[in-house]
Image (tube, grey):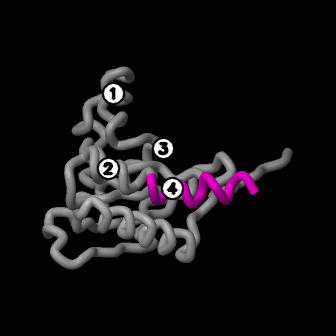
């Protein structure tokens, strides 16, 4: 009998590059954001806070990253997933999960390696910053 256990984790170097890319994009909006990046078990790998980012963005960015990593889903779509499967957020008994838009799962070579969460703007702005950051992976994944 053969057993295989495999778990992929995002490196600090990639996490830091994603955070910087999100911050660079936020500056063009202009918007002050917090960026949290977690690994596949929800541990914080990298956190960046721009000057003047509202303090609520600290917690929301981390919750968004955690939710995206745990579910493998965009936080905007997480509520639909729960509804389709007739599950309420409270039954999951995980206070770190959130339904606020702005968190995306991070995939590398089709494997979930973590989650990115942005806080500080509207859900749409936060999600845009996360999507721009993930373009780093999308372009390097094809090489």
The dot on residue 80 is 1
Q: Which region shows up in magenta?
A: 132-143
Q: Secondary structure at mark 4?
A: helix
- Dot 2 surroundings within 10 Å: few (below 14), some, or many (20 or more)? many
Rounded to the nearest angstrom, the CA distance separating label 4 from label 1 is 23 Å
Q: Count neighbours of disc 1 (C-alpha within 10 A) and say few if under 14, some if 14 to 19, many if 20 or more.
A: few
Q: Earlier in the sequence, mark 2 or mark 4?
A: 2
Task: Tell me if label 2 and label 4 are in contact, CB under 8 Å.
Answer: no
- Magenta residues, dominant SS class: helix
Q: Quadrant of residue 37?
A: bottom left
Query: Which secondary structure lies at badge 3?
Result: loop
Image height of 102 relative to 15, above or below? above
Of pointers 3 and 4, the one earlier in the residue sequence: 3
The residue under label 4 is 134
Nearer-the-camera pick, 41 or 49 = 49
Q: Is residue 114 magenta?
A: no
Please tell me whether residue 135 belongs to the stretch shown in magenta.
yes
Residue bearing mark 2: 102
Q: Identify which residue is drawn at 24% across, 63% down.
A: 30
**Tag in front: 2 or 1:** 2
Q: Residue furthest front?
A: 28
Give the quarter of the figure containing the N terminus. Answer: top right
Residue at disc 1, secondary structure? helix
Q: Earlier in the sequence, mark 3 or mark 2?
A: 3
């Amino acid at each position: 009998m053969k057993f295989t256990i495999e778990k992929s984790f995002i490196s600090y170097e990639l996490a830091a590059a994603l955070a910087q890319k999100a911050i660079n994009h936020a500056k063009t909006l202009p918007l002050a954001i917090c960026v949290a990046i977690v690994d596949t078990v929800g541990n914080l790998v990298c956190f960046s806070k721009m000057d003047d980012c509202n303090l609520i963005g600290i917690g929301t960015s981390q919750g968004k990253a955690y939710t995206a990593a745990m579910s493998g889903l965009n936080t905007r779509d997480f509520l639909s997933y729960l509804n389709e499967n007739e599950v309420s957020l409270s039954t999951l008994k995980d206070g770190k999960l959130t339904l606020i838009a702005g968190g995306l799962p991070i995939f590398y070579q089709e494997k979930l390696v973590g989650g990115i969460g942005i806080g500080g703007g509207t859900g749409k702005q936060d999600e845009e910053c996360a999507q721009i950051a993930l373009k780093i992976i999308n372009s390097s994944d094809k090489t």
